[in-house]
Image (cartoon, grey):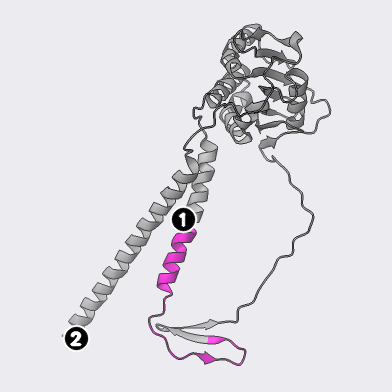
């Protein structure tokens, strides 16, 4: 009789433990998806507004303009110094860039010589100033063959819409075309996605979603671990604490004895001076001076 009662109690304990594990697993999944959707899916996209600041005018260097939007006055220039596009591709790209002039000036710029600039961000910003102008509304897509980087530089009110994060995403989506030498497809797709962003529409951001998912997974894991650890380590039996000579404390938890040491405080001293860097690896972000943008190696 006692054996049967013991067996029933054991089975009941196992069932209770299994149910607790299932509940915590469900909690873990809920937290995971909640965090993922919270950080991965924007509720709204930025749009151009009356409060945005920027100079509304055509290209600073009008001589290079190949198209002017009659309604907005914004212009297009294609400066293919690296000779990546054929004449037919250049004509097609010009047509593909026209929708951008509803919002700003648009420039395609390629070069095999970075002109002494150490980063594509600085090169693109310099090209932007010389073509579009400083603080003039515009976007410039740069193909830097010396550093093997494609890069978007944005100015005026456009840099608050096509942010460095958005520029990174666009170049994430198009760098494979550059790697394959498909320059027209790369540039056309890049400007098409830039227009999507300017129109307030979403663009594919797979790299951002992957990083957000991993971040959410990590946070959810630690939250779930904390709950489970708190439950598992809750003392079922507490006995009188015994002080050891070293000042430690012995606690009995179930059939185990845990030695609790004195709590010590640790600090990390930081230097008063700090430095920051952007980019690195396969990605180049930031910009020189007043430029704003992002890019990707190919």
- Judging by the rendered image, the residue that carries numbered circle 1 is 220
Whether 226 is among the magenta residues is yes
Residue 182 in picture, x, y percent from top left: 60, 19
Q: In terms of sequence position, does the residue under pointer 1 or pointer 2 come before the other?
A: 2
Q: Quadrant of the C terminus?
A: top right
Within 10 Å of disc 1 (Cα), the crowding (few <14, some 14-19, many 20+) is many
Occupied quadrant, residue 23: bottom left
| Residue closest to the eye, 121 or 43 | 43
Where are the magenta residues, as a range?
221-249
User: In this image, 25 relative to 163: left or right?
Assistant: left
Whether 137 is among the magenta residues is no
User: In this image, 138 relative to 40: left or right?
Assistant: right
Residue 123 in picture, x, y percent from top left: 76, 27
User: In this image, 37 relative to 184: left or right?
Assistant: left
Spot the residue most to the left: 1
Residue 83 visible to the viewer: no
- Judging by the rendered image, the residue that carries numbered circle 2 is 2
| Residue closest to the eye, 185 or 74 | 74
How far is disc 1 from disc 2 in space, using C-alphas?
A: 43 Å
Residue 206 in picture, x, y percent from top left: 51, 36
| In this view, 119 is above or below 219 | above
Viewer-side label of 1, 2: 1
Spot the residue most to the right: 116
| Residue closest to the eye, 57 or 115 | 57
Residue 200 in picture, x, y percent from top left: 51, 27
| Mark 1–mark 2 CB contact (< 8 Å) | no
| In this view, 239 is above or below 214 | below
The residue at the point 38 percent across, 52 percent down is: 30
């Amino acid at each position: 009789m006692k054996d049967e009662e013991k067996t029933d109690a054991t089975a009941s304990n196992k069932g209770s433990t299994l149910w607790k594990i299932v509940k915590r697993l469900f909690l873990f999944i809920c937290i995971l998806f909640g965090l993922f959707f919270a950080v991965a899916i924007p509720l709204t996209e930025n749009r151009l507004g009356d409060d945005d600041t920027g100079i509304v005018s055509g290209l600073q260097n009008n001589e290079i303009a190949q198209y002017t939007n009659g309604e907005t006055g914004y212009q297009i220039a294609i400066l293919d110094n690296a000779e990546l596009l054929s004449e037919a591709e250049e004509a097609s790209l010009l047509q593909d860039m026209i929708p951008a002039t509803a919002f700003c000036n648009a420039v395609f710029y390629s070069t095999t010589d970075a002109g002494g600039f150490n980063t594509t961000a600085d090169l693109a910003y310099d090209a932007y100033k010389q073509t579009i102008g400083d603080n003039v509304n515009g976007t410039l897509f740069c193909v830097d063959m010396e550093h093997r980087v494609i890069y978007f530089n944005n100015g005026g009110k456009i840099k608050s819409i096509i942010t460095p994060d958005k520029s990174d995403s666009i170049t994430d989506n198009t760098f494979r075309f550059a790697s394959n030498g498909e320059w027209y497809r790369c540039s056309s797709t890049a400007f098409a996605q830039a227009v999507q962003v300017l129109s307030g529409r979403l663009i594919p951001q797979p790299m951002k979603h992957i990083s957000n998912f991993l971040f959410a997974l990590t946070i959810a894991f630690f939250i779930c671990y904390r709950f489970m650890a708190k439950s598992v380590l809750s003392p079922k039996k507490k006995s009188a604490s015994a002080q050891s000579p070293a000042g430690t404390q012995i606690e009995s938890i179930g059939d185990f004895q845990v030695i609790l040491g004195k709590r010590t405080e640790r600090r990390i001293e930081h230097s008063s001076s700090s430095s920051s860097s952007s980019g690195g690896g396969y990605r180049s972000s930031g910009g020189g001076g007043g430029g704003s943008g992002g890019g990707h190696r190919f």
